Image (cartoon, rainbow, N blue to C red):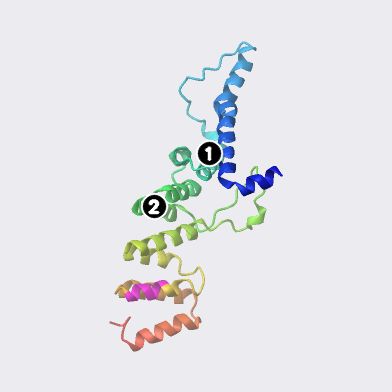
């Protein structure tokens, strides 16, 4: 009955949920947890100064801390707490400037499209073609033995952002790096480059795509049409 009443009054249900969450944070926050830890240590004659400045993490602890911070950043991001998410992402980047999760997180979080592009560009530059999966606390075998294609994902985001901004030089560079993704991926972007007059960039990307997919009828058809109109040869 109570569940039906809440479903019938969604705004009231949301208010109750928000009030409950605030009450939980008042009594079960990290601060309260550390205060209890400090209290337990005091009973054993050890003082934990909660007001002391944080110490720099030991290098050996940073990989696991970075993973934990990335998880916390995603949680804060999902809860609509951008400042907290950004702080964790930035801390990870201060240790590992090429960390993909943190770069992608900051790209998602950035309201300015050019700032977003700067993070995606860094991600493309810093990522290997495939990441070896880290065998740690979580089961990662389901992702496959070749790792994860972070560079391709970042390249796609960089390409889409560049096309939206009209930054066709960056778009062409990103598309050139993605030419081997699959036989159909490059085609609409090459046509878009042609439509905006970026003939040299389109020719470069078409050549790259044909290098991976020399028998693709759609790419060959574009090349034939283009050649008939005296495009790439000019």
- Residue 153 colored magenta? no
Residue placed most toward the observer, 160 or 223: 160
Q: Separation of disc 2 and disc 1 at Cα?
A: 21 Å
Q: Position of residue 178 (x, y in %)?
A: 45, 66
**Which segment is the magenta one?**
189-195
Q: Is residue 15 above or below residue 216?
A: above
Disc 1 target residue: 69
Q: Is residue 185 above or below residue 234?
A: above
Q: Residue at x 55, y 17 (%)?
A: 48
Q: Position of residue 64 (x, y in %)?
A: 57, 38
Q: Position of residue 59 (x, y in %)?
A: 51, 34
**175 with respect to 75 (left or right):** left
Q: Residue at x 64, y 51 (%)?
A: 140
Instruction: Rate crowding at label 2 as few (under 14), some (14 to 19) or many (20 or more) other CA atoms within 10 Å.
Output: many
Disc 2 target residue: 116
Q: Position of residue 62 (x, y in %)?
A: 53, 36
- Residue 194 colored magenta? yes
């Amino acid at each position: 009955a109570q569940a039906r009443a809440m479903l019938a009054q969604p705004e009231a249900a949301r208010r109750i949920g928000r009030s409950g969450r605030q009450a939980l944070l008042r009594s079960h926050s990290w601060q309260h947890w550390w205060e209890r830890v400090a209290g337990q240590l005091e009973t054993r004659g050890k003082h934990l100064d909660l007001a002391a400045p944080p110490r720099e993490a030991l290098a050996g602890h940073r990989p696991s801390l970075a993973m934990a911070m990335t998880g916390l950043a995603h949680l804060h991001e999902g809860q609509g707490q951008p400042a907290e998410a950004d702080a964790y992402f930035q801390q990870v980047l201060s240790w590992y400037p090429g960390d993909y999760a943190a770069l992608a997180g900051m790209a998602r979080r950035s309201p300015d499209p050019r700032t977003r592009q700067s993070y995606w560009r860094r991600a493309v530059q810093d990522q290997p073609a495939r990441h070896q999966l880290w065998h740690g606390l979580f089961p990662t075998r389901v992702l496959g033995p070749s790792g994860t294609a972070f560079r391709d994902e970042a390249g796609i985001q960089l390409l889409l952002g560049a096309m939206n901004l009209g930054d066709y030089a960056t778009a062409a560079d990103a598309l050139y790096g993605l030419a081997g993704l699959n036989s159909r991926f490059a085609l609409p972007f090459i046509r878009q480059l042609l439509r905006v007059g970026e003939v040299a960039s389109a020719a470069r990307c078409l050549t790259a795509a044909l290098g991976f997919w020399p028998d693709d009828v759609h790419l060959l058809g574009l090349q034939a049409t283009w050649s008939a109109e005296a495009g790439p040869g000019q």
